Image: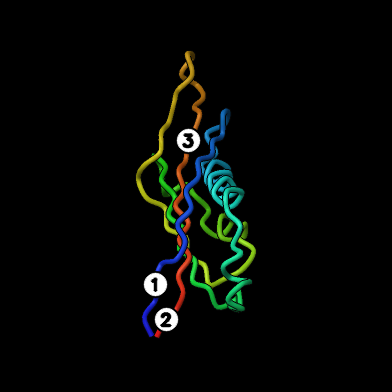
Amino acid sequence: MVAKRVILEMGTGNDLHGGNYTKAAIRAVEDALHHSSLTLIRTLGIDKKTLRIDVTIGVQRPERIDTAAVQAVLPFGNITVKAVKGGLDVPDDGGDDIAVIATAGVEVWLERP
């Protein structure tokens, strides 16, 4: 069996105050999820628990993301979350706060013969 990517959804999220990278990442994943309806899964009678879901989050400080918290947002599947350098940090005028902008790619894979 070979896994084939059948769905790719993208999203963005932010934390405007406090520099919380996990909060921005979760919002990016939720944004991606809110743009999709996986009717394909129901139509083909696929068990949702068997889906492989790979999430990639881009932020300026990937080491500050709690990947387990991001993983908990997804409702089903065998989930992996990877944080990479990306996104954007926007400092405020005073320099004591940042807005964190995160991007998310959510891939759904199916095993095919």
Check disc 3 and report its element: helix, strand or loop.
Answer: strand
Instruction: Identify which amino acid the numbered label 1 is placed on.
Output: Lys
Write down the quadrant of residue 43 in the picture.
Answer: bottom right
Write down the quadrant of residue 107 in the picture.
Answer: bottom left
What is the C-alpha distance between the residues marked 2 and 3?
Answer: 36 Å
Q: Is residue 112 left or right of residue 19?
A: left
What is the C-alpha distance between the residues marked 1 and 3?
Answer: 30 Å
The numbered dot on residue 112 is 2
Residue at x 58% of width, y 54% of height: 36
Find out whether the residues at labels 1 and 2 contact each other: C-beta distance under 8 Å: yes
| Image coords of residue 56 (percent x, y) | 43, 55
Colour setting: rainbow
On screen, residue 8 above or below 24: below
Label 2 neighbourhood size at 10 Å, few (<14), some (14-19), many (20+)?
few
Question: Which mark's residue is nearer the viewer, 2 or 3?
Answer: 2
Tag 3 residue? 101
